[in-house]
Amino acid sequence: MANEGYHEDPKELSNATKDYHRIIQSTMEELEAIDWYNQRAECATDPEAKAIMEHNRDEEIEHACMGIEWLRKNSPVWDSMLKEFLFKESDIVANEGNMSK
């Protein structure tokens, strides 16, 4: 369905907003696939099947990261938040209080 996930009439949305939506949807799908492959790999009894599912999971992680990077490059808010929260050694929730507004 072409309007899946839209909360407004797509005809009224800019191309930039539609692309933003597409990346969000695609990244969500990648995250879901990561979870599925991870569960399947954990339950696999055959080592080769497990290795294939772990490989597939990791490929999906790559795809999700690409979507997140696109969001970072195309949204100042994503850029700011990712820079604030990623690759920090401090407590994740406590770090929110340290955000510069």
Image (cartoon, rainbow, N blue to C red):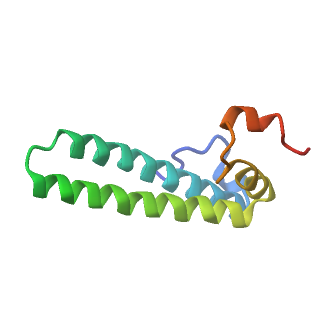
Front one among 22 and 93? 93
Q: Is residue 28 left or right of residue 59?
A: right
x and y percentages locating residue 75 in the rendered image: 75, 59
x and y percentages locating residue 96 in the rendered image: 77, 36
Q: Residue at x 17, y 52 (%)?
A: 50
x and y percentages locating residue 7 in the rendered image: 64, 40
Q: Residue at x 20, y 59 (%)?
A: 52
Q: Residue furthest front?
A: 89
Q: Quadrant of residue 95?
A: top right
Q: Is residue 40 left or right of residue 2?
A: left
Q: Residue at x 36, y 49 (%)?
A: 33
Q: Is residue 62 left or right of residue 73?
A: left
Front one among 71 and 83? 83
Give the number of marks.
0
Front one among 10 and 79? 79
Quadrant of the drawing holding the C terminus: top right
Measured along the vertical axis of the image, is residue 18 above or below residue 40?
A: below
Front one among 59 and 10? 59
Measured along the vertical axis of the image, is residue 34 above or below residue 97?
A: below
x and y percentages locating residue 2 in the rendered image: 50, 53
Q: Residue furthest left?
A: 46
Q: Residue furthest right?
A: 101
Q: Is residue 38 left or right of residue 21?
A: left
Q: Quadrant of residue 54?
A: bottom left
Q: Residue at x 51, y 46 (%)?
A: 4
